[in-house]
């Protein structure tokens, strides 16, 4: 049996009067690729930031690799935020050096190989890259660490549909396979073939955690179809849209 890597108990987080997470309980094993799925505003980024130690929960407990978020957990987590954060004037080679200096577990040769496979010239400055190619570089850097946990918040949103498959394959053939990858995404159809498990978040609560194969067998549908069914948007009387 695999060891438990992530454990959350009764997590609560509010921003002012808005309760973003209300009683999240979650256990994830090592070596899994897990989709964190939910409509806009359901709490995905909040949960990822709590796992990463960037936000503190108001209530509840989190452990990653047996420890609360802190120095140890930061050293075993490789995090891709939902917004680009590298300075535009930097060349990709500068970023490779930065990561090499900063993270002991960064494998530069692996990152360079992935850039080559993705057709990205590492001599270029970030500001000269398209949005999609910037995302590819950030993803390559994050996945080139030998981490225990990869937290990817909307990793391929700006990448064109034709390239998504190739990127996912390139990345997933190169990361540490003993690690767990938690991917928050709206592009379910594009990523579901690589997922072992999915977690559905709705209004700050986990409403489903299931193996992808079990969904296909039991429900007779893809994760994308199940998501659309469970989170079907219905119009309000006032004409606004809301999630069912
Ligand atoms: N800094 C903040 N201040 C106030 N409210 C916030 C803040 N950050 C998030 N929220 C609110 O908390 C809720 C959860 O937000 P969160 O960003 O975690 O959702 P999400 O599932 O990642 O959404 P999306 O899919 O749109 O990225 C939302 O209602 C959001 O408006």
Image (cartoon, grey):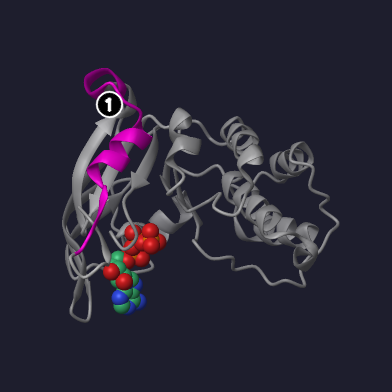
Left or right of 58? Residue 39 is: right
Ligand 1 neighbours mark 1 (CB distance < 8 Å) = no
Measuring from the top left, give residue 36's x and y in whole percent: 35, 46
Report the front residue among 131 and 117: 131
Mark yes or no: residue 28 visible. Answer: no
In the image, what residue occupies the spot 27% across and 45% down?
A: 200
Could you say which quadrant of the image residue 170 lies in? top right
Measuring from the top left, give residue 185's x and y in whole percent: 43, 49
Q: Helix or strand or loop: what does disc 1 sit on?
A: helix
Report the front residue among 184 and 163: 163
Considering only vertical position in the picture, is 147 above or below 193? below
Query: Where's ligand 1: which quadrant?
Result: bottom left
Mark yes or no: residue 32 visible. Answer: yes
In the image, what residue occupies the spot 86% across and 56% down?
A: 123
Q: Label 1, on which residue? A: 215
The region drawn magenta spans 216-236
Considering only vertical position in the picture, is 89 above or below 215? below
Measuring from the top left, give residue 216's x and y in whole percent: 31, 22
Left or right of 52? Residue 60 is: left
Question: Which residue is most to the top?
Answer: 217
Question: Which residue is most to the right?
Answer: 123
Left or right of 213? Residue 185 is: right
Specify few, some or many for label 1: CA neighbours under 10 Å numbering under 14, 14-19, or 20 or more. Answer: some
Q: Where the N terminus falls, by quadrant?
A: top left
In the image, what residue occupies the spot 75% across and 64% down?
A: 126
Measuring from the top left, give residue 88's x and y in whole percent: 72, 71
Considering only vertical position in the picture, is 121 above or below 215? below
Q: How many marks?
A: 1
């Amino acid at each position: 049996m695999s060891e438990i890597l992530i454990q959350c108990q009764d997590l609560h987080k509010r921003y002012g009067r808005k309760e973003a997470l209300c009683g999240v309980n979650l256990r994830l094993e090592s070596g899994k690729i897990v989709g964190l799925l939910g409509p806009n505003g359901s709490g995905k980024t909040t949960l990822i930031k709590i796992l990463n130690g960037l936000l503190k929960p108001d209530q509840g407990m989190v452990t990653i690799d047996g420890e609360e978020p802190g120095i140890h957990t930061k050293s075993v987590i490789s995090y891709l935020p939902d917004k680009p954060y590298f300075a535009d004037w930097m060349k990709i080679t500068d970023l490779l050096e930065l990561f090499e200096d900063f993270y002991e577990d960064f494998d530069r040769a692996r990152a360079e190989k992935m850039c080559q496979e993705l057709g990205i010239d590492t001599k270029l400055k970030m500001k000269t890259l398209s949005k999609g190619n910037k995302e590819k570089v950030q993803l390559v850097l994050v996945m080139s660490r030998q981490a225990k946990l990869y937290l990817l918040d909307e990793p391929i949103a700006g990448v064109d549909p034709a390239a998504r498959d190739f990127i996912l394959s390139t990345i997933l053939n190169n990361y540490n396979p003993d690690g767990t990858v938690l991917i928050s995404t709206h592009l379910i159809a594009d990523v579901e073939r690589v997922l072992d498990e999915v977690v559905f978040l709705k209004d700050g609560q986990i409403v489903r955690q299931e193996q992808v194969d079990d969904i296909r067998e039991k429900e007779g549908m893809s994760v994308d179809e199940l998501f659309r069914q469970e989170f079907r948007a219905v119009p309000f009387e006032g004409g606004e849209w809301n999630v069912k």
